[in-house]
Image: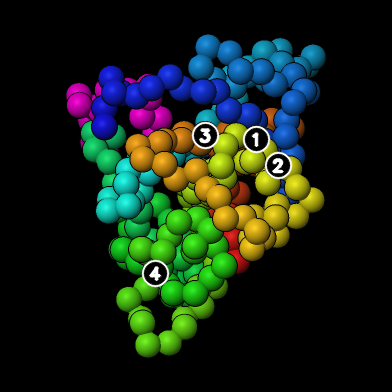
Amino acid sequence: MYRAGFGVQIPGRLFRWRQGNITHVSNGGYQWYNGDWWHNSHDRGQNLLTHYRTTSLFWCNDFTQFLMLESDATTQDMETAAPPDNRWYPLTFNNVNGVSRVAVALDDQYLAGNSAWWIERLGLESYRSLERTRPVEVNGLGGRIATIFALVAFSCRDANDLYTILTSRDWCRRLRSPNRAHHGRRHERGVVVNVYLDPDNPVGSTPATLEYLEWDGDPILR
């Protein structure tokens, strides 16, 4: 899948994550312009948001499942890009103490267990551990924030469904509702998720704090 084969990209929304709660950022000086997010404030003027991480995630088909890239596949030519951006990668995991953390090029091809409410909801049934004789609970899903929310996006029927989930009072509880039979995993559909540092939270939103959240903090889904 190269950039020349992509359809028209549909701009998404900007959300703020703070202590596990998610809100839609619809004002406050934030705007989408020329392919990126900007912030305009009285004291600092107009500035490009500081980028942290990106995930491009595609649902290919029932056999290949998910393929991902930790950059924006729509802004570069993969055929001529330098490694590691010159190919697609399968989902991989780092399993420690029953918690699975997701990213590219990690040691484990499968989750730390075979039982968790979010496995089926996120379309990760094929990534269950190979233990088949008894239930083994996965203690949570962490890792790259952008990748996790790309998976959440695929669990939703469309952008409006995703908005409803993320802005719910308890978005994890809404996501795990047994009534959610629909999803957005359709043949060769892709999503790009960008994570930026929050200029309104300069202490809590830094590369160090986000890196800790991804690899050492509590899992995002449990």
Q: Total label count?
A: 4
Q: Amino acid at mark 4?
A: Arg
Query: Are the two marked residues, 1 and 2, in contact with CB atoms closer than 8 angstroms?
Result: yes
State which region is magenta. Answer: 70-84
Label 1 sits on a secondary structure element that is: helix
* The quadrant where residue 85 appears: top left
Instruction: Mark 2 or mark 4: name the one nearer the start of the chain.
Output: 4
Point 70% across, 55% down: residue: 174
Residue 20 lies left or right of residue 148; in this view the side is right
Give the mark nearest the N terminus, 1 or 3. Answer: 1
Q: Which amino acid, mark 2?
A: Thr
- Residue 160, which numbered label? 1
Q: Is residue 189 above or below residue 111?
A: above
Q: Which circle's residue, 3 or 4, is located before the other in the chain?
A: 4
- Whether 110 is among the magenta residues is no
Q: Height in image: 171 above or below 10?
A: below
Q: CA distance from mark 2 to mark 4?
A: 28 Å
Q: Hey, what amino acid is under mark 3?
A: Asn
Q: Is residue 192 above or below residue 126?
A: above
Q: Amino acid at mark 1?
A: Asn
Callouts 4 and 1 close, C-beta under 8 Å: no
Mark 4 nearby-residue class (10 Å; few <14, some 14–19, many ≥20): many
Disc 1 to disc 3, how far (Cα)?
18 Å
For discs 3 and 4, the disc positioned in front in the rendered view: 4
Of badges 3 and 2, the one in the foreground is: 2
- Residue linked to disc 3: 194
What residue did someone put label 2 on? 164
Residue at position x 46%, y 34% in the image: 192
- Residue for badge 4: 128
The percent coordinates of residue 48 (x first, y second) are 59, 19
Q: CA distance from mark 4 to mark 1?
A: 29 Å
